[in-house]
Image (tube, grey):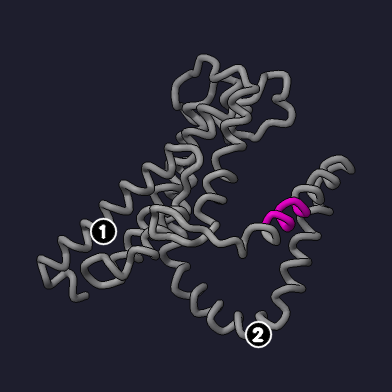
Amino acid sequence: MAPAADPAATLALLAAVGTGVGLGTLSGLIPGLHANTFALLLAAAASSLPGPRLYVGVAMLSAGVTHTFLDVIPALALGVPDPAMAASALPSHQLVIEGRGREALRLSALGSGLAVVFAVPLAVPLTLLMERAYPLLRPWLSVLLAGIAVLLVVTEHGRHQQVGAACSLAASGLLGIGLLDAPVTGALPVSDVLVPLFSGLFGAPVLLAAIEGDGVPPQADATVTTP
């Protein structure tokens, strides 16, 4: 509770929160950027930033929370498919096609708000639980992850969807094998390949969907009619 008694520390903490909110706003609204990208940049620059490292963590957390509120906006504005593909569209895109995009935004904001409300009281007990459970799970982690991957594939509806899920899983595995150990150098203080990799993986699908779509049709008000 020291920051509450020290005005300078309180201002620094608020500045860290404000920085995180600003970074999360950028990552949420710009396709190709993600809060994880900024987290890697902040972690790489942590040793050269003034103040306790706690403030870097606060900025990361603020950026991540802000991102969850705003990342739906470019997805709805750019990733709307052609109306003929409505049957295979995401629920939020179906609402946009029906002219209920503002309702979809409001529902997303309500969902993010409720997630924060539930996450705050659950954070401490879940952290304590994972601290005790992880040493038991660690020897079996590869088996657990393989089981989850298989479950994701077999629970897809239909043979074509299962084949597509398996191909997607295999492609992601090959991508990781081929690139995760690759050396990266550049102007930014990060030597991790995940920074450029995340930018492409998060940005390309939305932009590709936007190229093929017909754009956003006229939208109604933000009244929530979904039960």
Instruction: Name the residue: 44% across, 21% down.
Output: 221
Q: Is residue 225 left or right of residue 65?
A: right
> Tag 1's secondary structure?
helix
Is residue 170 a member of the stretch shown in magenta? yes
Query: Residue 11 location, x and y as percent?
Result: 15, 61
Query: Residue 106 location, x and y as percent?
Result: 45, 35
Q: Which residues are magenta?
A: 169-175
Is residue 75 a member of the stretch shown in magenta? no
- Residue at numbered disc 1: 16
Number of numbered markers = 2
Q: Looking at this rendering, what residue extends furthest in the left direction?
A: 7
> Tag 2's secondary structure?
helix
Q: Nearer the viewer, residue 191 or 160?
A: 191
Q: Residues within 10 Å of mark 1 (few under 14, many from 20)?
A: many
* Gap between marks 1 and 2 measured at Cα: 36 Å
1 or 2: mark nearer the eye: 1
Instruction: Name the residue: 53% across, 81% down.
Output: 131
Q: Assign the magenta stretch its main secondary structure.
A: helix
- Residue 92 against residue 63 in the figure, above or below: above
Q: Amino acid at mark 2?
A: Leu
Instruction: Name the residue: 21% across, 69% down.
Output: 51
Counting residues from the start of the chain, the first of labels 1 and 2 encountered is 1
Instruction: Name the residue: 61% across, 85% down.
Output: 135
- Residue at numbered disc 2: 136
Q: Nearer the viewer, residue 45 or 159?
A: 45
